Image (cartoon, rainbow, N blue to C red):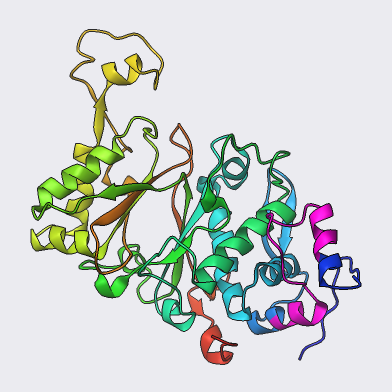
C-alpha cells in the first residue's frame, strides 16, 4: 500500500460507541452512525483511485470551500462505501460544481433539494447497483452509500449543516441518499449516456430535486392515455414551476408507451405539450404573482421551457404500473441537469482511466 501524508486532524476513541458520540457531538454525521475513517481505510480509497490527499476535486467559489481527495475519501469511508465507489462520488461532485447546477444555492435553499443521481454504463454492473425493484428504497449498498457520501461531504466539507447553512423548510428523505442506476436492459430507448453523446462511458447525471411524486396507472394500455396521466401529474400545482424535472418510468409503463411507436424525443415532446396550467388558475391559486387579465383563462404556462427540460429515465421492477415525477427543488427556473463521465481525466481529454480493470472490487 502507498504511504500518504494526511492533513486532517486525527483523534482516537476508547471504543466504537465513544467514537460515534464524538462525531455526533461535533455534528459530523447525517444523524446515522458512521464507519470510523481510519488512516488505513482512507488510504485504501485514495490508492484505489490514484489520488494524493491534497489533490483538489472541486471548489465551491461561493463559500471558498476546497474539496480535496482526502476529504472525499474520509466521508466515503464514513458513509459505508467500498473503495470502488470513490470515482463515482468524485464524478458526482464534479457535475455538481458546474456553474449551471448552482451547487451552493441547491444545498442551502429553503426548498430543500436532494442530489438525485442517475448512474449509467458498465459500472452499474461492476458495482452491483440497483436499477430494478425498490429502486428508490433501501437494500442496495452502492445506491445507499454513494448518495450518503455526497450528503456527508455537503455537511462536513461544504458546510451545509442542517439548521445552520442548510435552511430547508422541510427537506425530504432523499436528502439521506437519492442515487440509482438506470434499468438500461429494460428500456426500449437509448440510455442517458448515449442520449447525451457519452457513448459507452459510465456516467453520472445529477438533478437538484424535490421529493418524488408517485404516478399510479394500472389500467391504461393506450400510450397517449398513459402519457396524459403522467403529464397531468407533472402539472400538479404544488410543485409547478418552469424548472427542469425528471420522469422515471417503470419498465411496464415504458413498454406500453414504446409499443405505441413513441421514440424518446417524442415522449418528452408529448409530456411537455401536455403538462400545463392556465395563467389565470396559477394566479388565482397563489402560485404566481399578478392580476388576471383578459385571455389568461386560455394562456397556458408549461412545465419547463421545452422538451429538453425533461430527464427521461427507465428504472424499477419489471411488474407494476408505478412511475415517478421528480421536479426541480426551486420555484424558479434555477439548477440545470449535469452529466460527467466516471473515471475520465477531465483536464486531459477523453482519456478513460480503467479503474475497474486496474483494481479488483472488494467484497460484494
Left or right, 217 with respect to 128, comes to: left
Query: Total of numbered circles in the picture?
Result: 0
Residue drawn at point x = 44 percent, y = 42 percent: 328
Q: What percent of the width, then of the height, locates residue 113?
A: 53, 44
Q: Is residue 265 visible?
A: yes
Q: Residue at x 59, y 37 (%)?
A: 109
Question: Which corner quadrant holds the N terminus?
Answer: bottom right
Determine if the magenta segment contains residue 37.
yes
Q: Can residue 354 be seen here?
A: no
Residue nearest the observer in this picture, 111 or 201: 111
> Does residue 128 appear to the left or right of 25 in the view shown?
left
> Which quadrant of the figure has residue 79?
bottom right
Estimate the x, y position of residue 12 in percent, counting from the top left. Answer: 91, 71
Quick one: 33 or 29, which is closer to the camera?
33
Query: Is 25 in the magenta?
Result: yes
The segment highlighted magenta reads: 20-44
Q: Nearer the viewer, residue 338 or 327?
A: 327
Residue at image point 35% right, 73% down: 199
Which residue corresponds to the image point at 82% horizontal and 78% vertical from the top-left?
39
Whether 302 is drawn above or below 69: the answer is above
Q: Quadrant of residue 91?
A: bottom right
On the image, which quarter does residue 259 sit in?
A: bottom left
Q: Eyeballing the image, is 109 above or below 43?
A: above
Relative placement, left or right, of 334 versus 147 is left
Q: Position of residue 52 (x, y in %)?
A: 75, 76
Vertically, is 32 above or below 354? Answer: above
**Residue 279 horizontal side relative to residue 107, left or right:** left
* Residue 224 x/y as whole percent: 11, 48
Amino acid at each position: 500500500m502507498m504511504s500518504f501524508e494526511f492533513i486532517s486532524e486525527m483523534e482516537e476513541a476508547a471504543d466504537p460507541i465513544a467514537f460515534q458520540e464524538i462525531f455526533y457531538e461535533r455534528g459530523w454525521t447525517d444523524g446515522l452512525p458512521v464507519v470510523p475513517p481510519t488512516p488505513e481505510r482512507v488510504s485504501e480509497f485514495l490508492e484505489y483511485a490514484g489520488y494524493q490527499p491534497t489533490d483538489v476535486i472541486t471548489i465551491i467559489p461561493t463559500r471558498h470551500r476546497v474539496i480535496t481527495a482526502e476529504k472525499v475519501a474520509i466521508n466515503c469511508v464514513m458513509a459505508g462505501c467500498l473503495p470502488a465507489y470513490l470515482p463515482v462520488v468524485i464524478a458526482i461532485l464534479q457535475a455538481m460544481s458546474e456553474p449551471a447546477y448552482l451547487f451552493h444555492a441547491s444545498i442551502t435553499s429553503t426548498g430543500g433539494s436532494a442530489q438525485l443521481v442517475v448512474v449509467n454504463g458498465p459500472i452499474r454492473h461492476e458495482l452491483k447497483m440497483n436499477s430494478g425493484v425498490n429502486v428508490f428504497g433501501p437494500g442496495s449498498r452502492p445506491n445507499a452509500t454513494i448518495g450518503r457520501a455526497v450528503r456527508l461531504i455537503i455537511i462536513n466539507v461544504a458546510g451545509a449543516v442542517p439548521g445552520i447553512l442548510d435552511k430547508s423548510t422541510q427537506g425530504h428523505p432523499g436528502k439521506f441518499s437519492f442515487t440509482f442506476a438506470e434499468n438500461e436492459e429494460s428500456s426500449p430507448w437509448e440510455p442517458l449516456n448515449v442520449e447525451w453523446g457519452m457513448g459507452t462511458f459510465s456516467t453520472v447525471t445529477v438533478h437538484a430535486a424535490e421529493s418524488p411524486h408517485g404516478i399510479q396507472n394500472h389500467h391504461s394500455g393506450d400510450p397517449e392515455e398513459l402519457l396524459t396521466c403522467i403529464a397531468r401529474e407533472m402539472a400538479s400545482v404544488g410543485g409547478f414551476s418552469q424548472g427542469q424535472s425528471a420522469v422515471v418510468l417503470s419498465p411496464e409503463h415504458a413498454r406500453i408507451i414504446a409499443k405505441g411507436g413513441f421514440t424518446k424525443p417524442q415522449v418528452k415532446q408529448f409530456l411537455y405539450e401536455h403538462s400545463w396550467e392556465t395563467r389565470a388558475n396559477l394566479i388565482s391559486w397563489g402560485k404566481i404573482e399578478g392580476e388576471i387579465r383578459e385571455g389568461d383563462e386560455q394562456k397556458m404556462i408549461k412545465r419547463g421551457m421545452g422538451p429538453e427540460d425533461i430527464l427521461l429515465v427507465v428504472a424499477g421492477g419489471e411488474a407494476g404500473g408505478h412511475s415517478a415525477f421528480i421536479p426541480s427543488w426551486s420555484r424558479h427556473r434555477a439548477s440545470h441537469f449535469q452529466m460527467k463521465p466516471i473515471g475520465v481525466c477531465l483536464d486531459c481529454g477523453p482519456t478513460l482511466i480503467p479503474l475497474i480493470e486496474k483494481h479488483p472490487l472488494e467484497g460484494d
